[in-house]
Image (cartoon, grey):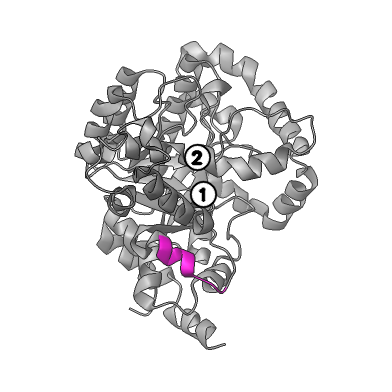
Amino acid sequence: MDRYLVISSDGHVGLPPEQYRTYLESRYHAAFDEALAKEIKAREEREKLFLIDDFNTKWRAKVGDGLEGAWDGTIRNRVLDADGVAAEVLFPDGITERNAPPFGADVGLNPAASTPELQWAGARAHNRWLAEFCAEDPHRRLGLAVIPAVFDLDETIKEIHWAKKNGMKGVFFPAVTDKYDMYNHTKYYPVWELLQDYKLPLHFHSGATPGYDMTQPGWIGTYLCEFAFWMTRPLWSMTFGGVFEEYPELKVMFTEAGGEFWFPWMIELMDIRASVKHTSGKLGDYNANMSMKPSDYFKRNIYVGCSALPDEETTESYYKIGIDRILWGTDYPHPEGTWPSTLEKMILSLGGLPESDIQQMLGGNALDAYDVDAGALWGIASRIGPRKESFIRQAAE
């Protein structure tokens, strides 16, 4: 075929905030009604604190109704067709967007953002809407169940069962565990076993960090230097904790962490720390839970969702991570993503690479990672996928 199959590893969806009420259990309606205006106001204030109020206003005017693809399936498919994307993995929204789930069940999923009961309620409301949204076009929409896993393991396991039964293609857990147990804790073993048995990949996404004083200078730069650390903290806690030793078929995705520069360094750091030396021997045997190097677990269990790969000539970092570990993504409908210039950015990032490597990153790895109908997706790609010749021309220029 003369086109590539593209499966985006990073899409965001969510209802306009007031519409989540329909999907909430009625006992939470009063709390929702009280919180709605406050949450809308808080997002507007964050836009000002992030110094992006004017930027977002111009962005929204530029892209028109394309932003409504966050909840409107017809618009979303129109955008995907124009971008050449056959399917996408769907995270909730958050940060400055206007369609995040209620009670802190957004893309940050920070345990400190809400009371456990309310965050669970918001997560379930989003999941139940998302199941309907994905059912409208199940081949193209790979929904992730939002699960505030740190609060209650029984509820976590129950929601995973629900997710599998209702067609979700993975789960999304909080990366920041705050005062709760990290994911190396053995109490999570039943969760990992269930995800492995169900072949549901586990996802972490950038967003949450410990709190900052947003009234003080320099906090944005601090956030930009730290967010990748907090998002990938589960990587080394699970690796050194022996999770991947015990559950070799568990798949874990880390999405939007600046993968092109961050992960080669993290892989090397973990291997260095796993090699006990004179300077670290006094700390004891911290390799007892592993029979392989951390980098070997990474090659087997981990995928990196690289959203909007950089517009640069060097592609060395892709190979340091591993071509078979990278899941390309658009980050639609966020302004830092590739939309509405997706083809151009694809070519800038991947043009000139071997055809097989491009296809692996754009969609082949996702076919291996997710339970999808490959035949149906290749059929969609044959109609709307980016033409391979465009990438060849870029290499010759």
Label 1 is placed on what type of residue? Glu
Locate residue 135, reporting x and y percent: 35, 43
Label 2 is placed on what type of residue? Met
153 horizontally vs 206: left or right: left
Contact check, label 2 and label 1, Cβ < 8 Å: yes
Which residue corresponds to the image point at 50% horizontal and 39% vertical from the top-left? 231
Locate residue 379, reporting x and y percent: 32, 67
Q: Secondary structure at mark 1?
A: loop
Residue under label 1: 256
Q: Residues within 10 Å of mark 1 (few under 14, many from 20)?
A: many
Magenta span: helix, strand or loop, mainly? Answer: helix
The stretch drawn in magenta includes residue 65: no
Extent of the magenta region: 313-320
Image-quadrant location for residue 155 = top left
Please say whether residue 224 is visible from this viewpoint: yes
Which residue corresponds to the image point at 37% horizontal and 44% vertical from the top-left? 277
Residue 231: mark in rendering: 2
Q: Tell me which label, 2 or 1, sits earlier in the chain.
A: 2
